[in-house]
Amino acid sequence: MRSIVFLGMTLLAASVGIGQNHPSLPSSFRATTIHSPEGADIFVRSGGRGPVVVLLHGYAENSDSWAPLAADLMKDHSVVVPDLRGIGRSSKPESGYDKKTQAKDIRAVVTRLGYDRTFVVAHDIGNMVAYAYAAMYPDKVKRLVVMDAPIPGIEPWNEIEAECGTYMCARLKLLVNPGVWHFNFHGAYPAYPGPGAERLVAGRERIYFDGIWDDFTGDPSKPDEATRNFFAATYTLPGGMRAGFAQFTAFSQDAKDNKIFEQTKLPMPVLAVGGEKSFGALQAVIMRHVATNVQEAVVVGSGHWLMEERPTETVALIRNFLDAGETKQ
């Protein structure tokens, strides 16, 4: 299996073009694959020295999306950057895409690398995994950063426009609203079983992802062409789109799990970051349902793709928040 993945990634590199300026984690980072007891092999890269920070990427991307932040934090932190189950160079099992299971994957990565308590920084679907991780292991998370994504089951997951009062909140009538069409575009319907969505996008992955990138960017030029080609290619690996769609199929189970997690508020400090042209202050509204100490930050001019659209500003926000935690210890 690993030889197939290696061959696939070699072909991926060729397909996006040697030397193109797509995001890439620092070359000094060490790569390894860690087996999770939950039935997945998690590809992870790590580097630097100092307090440990775990970076959890989102959908339509992979762990290389953290390149700007990793390059900055590695100066004085140990930075751990996994590919989530089913994405990038991690394995793509048939099941286990609920975020509670993926949180256990991340715990296996942390402990196998010899770490225990860490900072956690997340974006997009990574937020959902990070929330489950923080809820399950609250004493293992020093500080939590979540960026520009909802949490299944946590309001305004099901609120209607009249209850929301903001544009982005109204878009988050998530189970029915076409503004987030990709949340339901996975073909997992009782009347239509099988890989329908996979067949529709086969050979057209870039077109599918362009729809997501364009809908949620604040800058039509971001992500740029090289970045789009690179990320789209990672999902063309065998099982890539099936596993990607499974992230969304699991939302109903995630919502049930999160309703239980919500009964106990997160105790650690939380930084809730939203792009001005995307979630904005709504990210903090969401997190105040589940945490007791939430700081709000809005990245001016940015849409959803914060690392691509406003890397300098976003890195500064995260670093300042993490550094504040160190000075208090």
Image (cartoon, rainbow, N blue to C red):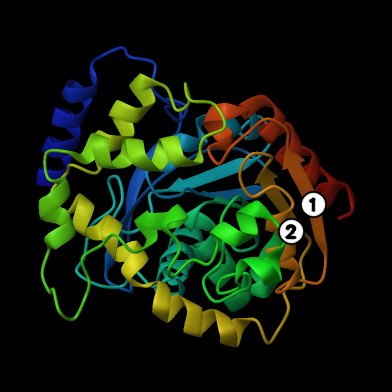
Rendered location of residue 286, percent (x, y) = 68, 65
C-alpha separation, residue under disc 1 versus residue under disc 2:
5 Å
Label whose residue precedes the other's in the sequence (1 or 2):
2
Rendered location of residue 293, percent (x, y) = 83, 65
The disc at residue 296 is 1
10 Å crowding of disc 1: few (<14), some (14-19), many (20+)? some
Q: Does the CB distance between marks 1 and 2 fall below 8 Å? A: yes
Q: Amino acid at mark 1?
A: Glu
The disc at residue 1 is none
Residue ID at (45%, 40%): 215
Answer above or below: position of 89 versus 177: above
Horizontal relation, residue 167 to residue 230: left or right? right
Quadrant of the rendered image containing residue 39: bottom left
Answer above or below: position of 73 versus 110: above
Horizontal relation, residue 4 to residue 293: left or right? left
**Residue 1 visible, this orientation:** no
Residue to which mark 2 is pinned = 284
- The residue lying furthest to the front in this view is 162
Residue ID at (59%, 33%): 69
Q: Amino acid at mark 2?
A: Ala
